[in-house]
């Protein structure tokens, strides 16, 4: 298997092993690279100025995979990086602000695009809060949608504007644009309060129990994804599952009508959906709102400007 050089927005990107099959249906690395090249105009605005973590699958989804935080030494000199301190170590994260970088990441067998919930201007304070709805094996997706609607109602009660997307697997992600003035620990506490509200009113199906064995038949509300150093698979990220599903923005009306089948959103169909609806999360950044009401309800007494350096040290995606 040889290599080839392509030009992407004036940058030279060397591609290799394009014939390698990455998904069992015969989807190749070339199709992976082509997908991220084509989706770049839609996804780059969401990734802009966010530290990224690569989830690499050099032998496809059935092979070994690994997370890589540090930008490799062999990366082209035009790849932008940003240092973030973790305890006594700095990690130089890749920042994906252009299509050439996204194509280069795809050539590194980076199937999943994981990004921080904060941007470089204020990396210690996220501008997105998240609730990750993670169903136990065998839980119907209708139950996940029921819990998502409860989360939406709770968040809206506190003046927030939630957006939903499929995880690309069996769950849902709820993204909440917020003012970038609260450290990660504070945001985590706020989302913990929401999760506990939901489990209080719907204990039969919702849980904050971290032990997998104790979650049978329930949806785990993973508010800990808001911790410093954690990353989320962002919208339009492909996932390492059969059919190459994509994490796909949703209309709340689709969830209300139980009209969501996550398996239908994949590498082959996502562009038809974008043609029909546009980018449903495209205006999310214009809805950043204060967490003051939610934090007050949670009984939070801390200061907005407190530091969280070192909190959740060693957290990984």
Image: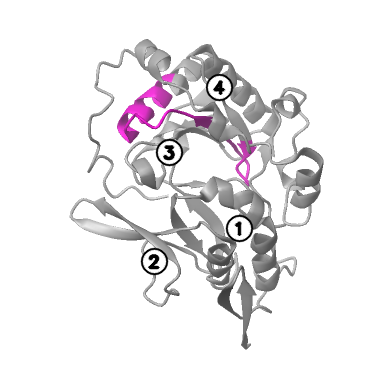
Q: How far apart are marks 2 and 1 (CA)?
A: 22 Å
Residue, disc 2: 71
**Nearer to us in this view, 26 or 129:** 129
Instruction: Give the residue drawn at x 39%, y 66%.
Output: 71
Mark closest to the chain's N terminus, 2 or 3? 2
User: Which of the two labelled residues, at mark 2 and mark 1, occupies the earlier sequence position?
Assistant: 2
For residue 209, what is the image quadrant? top left
For the residues labelled 2 and 4, the Cα–Cα distance comes to: 36 Å
Q: Nearer the viewer, residue 154 or 42?
A: 42
Q: Which mark's residue is nearer the viewer, 4 or 1?
A: 4
Labels in figure, total = 4
Residue at the spot of label 4: 151
Residue 138 appears in the picture as rendered: no
Would you name the residue on which mark 3 appears? 225
- Which callout, 4 or 1, points at the residue further toward the start of the chain? 4
Q: Is residue 233 visible?
A: yes
Q: Residue 240 bears which disc, if any?
A: 1
At mark 2, the secondary structure is loop
Across and down, in percent, residue 228 comes to 34, 41
Between disc 2 and disc 4, whose residue precedes? Answer: 2
- Which of discs 2 and 4 lies nearer the camera? The answer is 2
Numbered range of the magenta stretch: 165-193
């Amino acid at each position: 298997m040889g290599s080839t050089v392509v030009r992407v927005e004036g940058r030279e990107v060397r591609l290799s092993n394009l014939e390698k099959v990455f998904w069992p249906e015969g989807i190749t690395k070339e199709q992976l690279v082509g997908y991220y090249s084509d989706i770049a105009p839609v996804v780059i605005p969401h990734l802009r100025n966010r530290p990224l973590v690569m989830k690499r699958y050099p032998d496809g989804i059935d092979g070994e995979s690994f997370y890589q935080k540090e930008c490799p030494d062999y990366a082209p000199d035009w790849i932008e990086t940003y240092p973030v301190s973790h305890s006594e170590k700095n990690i130089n994260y890749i920042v994906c602000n252009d299509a050439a970088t996204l194509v280069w990441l795809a050539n590194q067998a980076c199937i999943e695009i994981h990004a921080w919930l904060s941007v470089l201007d204020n990396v210690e304070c996220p501008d997105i809060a998240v609730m990750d709805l993670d169903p136990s094996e065998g839980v119907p997706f209708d139950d996940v949608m029921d819990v998502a609607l409860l989360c939406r109602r709770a968040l809206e009660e506190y003046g927030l504007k939630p957006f939903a997307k499929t995880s690309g697997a069996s769950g849902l992600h709820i993204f909440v644009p917020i003012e970038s003035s609260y450290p990660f620990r504070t945001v985590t506490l706020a989302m913990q309060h929401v999760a506990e509200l939901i489990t209080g009113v719907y204990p039969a199906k919702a849980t904050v129990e971290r032990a997998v064995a104790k979650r049978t038949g329930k949806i785990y509300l993973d508010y800990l994804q808001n911790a410093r150093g954690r990353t989320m698979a962002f919208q339009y990220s492909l996932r390492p599952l059969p059919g190459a599903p994509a994490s796909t923005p949703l209309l709340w009306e689709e969830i209300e009508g139980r009209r969501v089948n996550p398996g239908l959103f994949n590498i082959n169909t996502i562009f038809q959906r974008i043609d029909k609806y546009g980018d449903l999360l495209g205006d999310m950044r214009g809805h950043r709102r204060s967490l003051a009401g939610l934090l007050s309800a949670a009984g939070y007494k801390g200061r907005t400007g407190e530091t969280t350096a070192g909190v959740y040290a060693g957290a990984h995606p």
